[in-house]
Image (cartoon, helix red, strand yellow):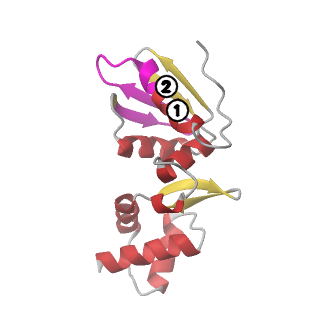
Amino acid sequence: MKAGRQRRIVGLIRQVPITSQTQLVKMLRGSGFPATQATVSRDLDELGAVKVRREGKVVYSLPSESVSVPAGDAVSRMFSESVLGLESSGNLVVVKTPPGHAGMVGGALDRLGLEGVAGTIAGDDTILVVCKQGVMSRKVERRLRGMVESLPGSDLAPAED
């Protein structure tokens, strides 16, 4: 049942712009796959689905759909479209996003498991990336900045030294 439901989720994400888990639950039910929002949330996480901005909408995307993005997959695409600024301070890196994007970007950062990152805290448009003891926040900032700047069309301002 789970494998079939996840295959259907992949098919739906590839066919239709899915903007919410509620929309996906309704579509799954219409396809004969009864599911709850919690189940769909777990499935999306297991599939590596992330929300990206596409044609003015924030929709779910799968890593394999990001053909033009090098090894960083859909997460890198999301970063290029959602990270507006980065600044390190102490053992923190402050990440600025458009309103409503911090949660999805922070969650993606947590799932990436970047070296030197203890975790993230996300608000509406700001994420605090907490660096592990002894890790220079500037190093983590450069790593994050590199993920964004390597993509075509990135508007992230250059780092100030």
- Classify 10 Å Cα crowding around label 2: few (below 14), some (14-19), many (20 and above): some
**Does the segment drawn in magenta span residue 119?**
yes
Q: Which residues are magenta?
A: 118-141
Q: Residue at x 49, y 32 (%)?
A: 144
Q: Is residue 126 above or below residue 62?
A: above
Task: Identify residue type, mark 2.
Answer: Arg
Evaluate whether residue 35 shows in this view.
Answer: no
Does residue 89 sit above or below 10 in this rendering?
above
Viewer-side residue, 55 vs 69: 69
**Residue drawn at (41%, 62%), measured in percent from left and top?**
44
Q: Nearest the camera: 63 or 71?
A: 71
The residue positioned 47% from the left and 46% from the top of the image is 72
Residue 135: percent from the left, percent from the top? 34, 19
For numbered disc 1, what is the local secondary structure?
helix
- Circle 2 sits on which residue? 142
| Inter-mark Cα distance, 2 to 1 | 6 Å
Q: Nearer the viewer, residue 57 or 146?
A: 146
Residue pictured at 52% horizontal, 45% vertical? 76
Q: Is residue 35 above or below residue 128?
A: below
* Residue on which the image places disc 1: 146
Place of residue 17 in the rendered image (x, y in percent of width and height, measured from the top left): 60, 68
Amino acid type at image mark 1: Gly
Query: Element type at marker 2?
Result: helix
Q: How many marks?
A: 2
137 in the magenta segment:
yes
User: For this view, does 145 lie left or right of residue 29?
Assistant: right
Tell me where residue 8 appears, x and y as whole percent. 43, 78
Q: Quadrant of the N terminus?
A: bottom left
Disc assigned to residue 86? none
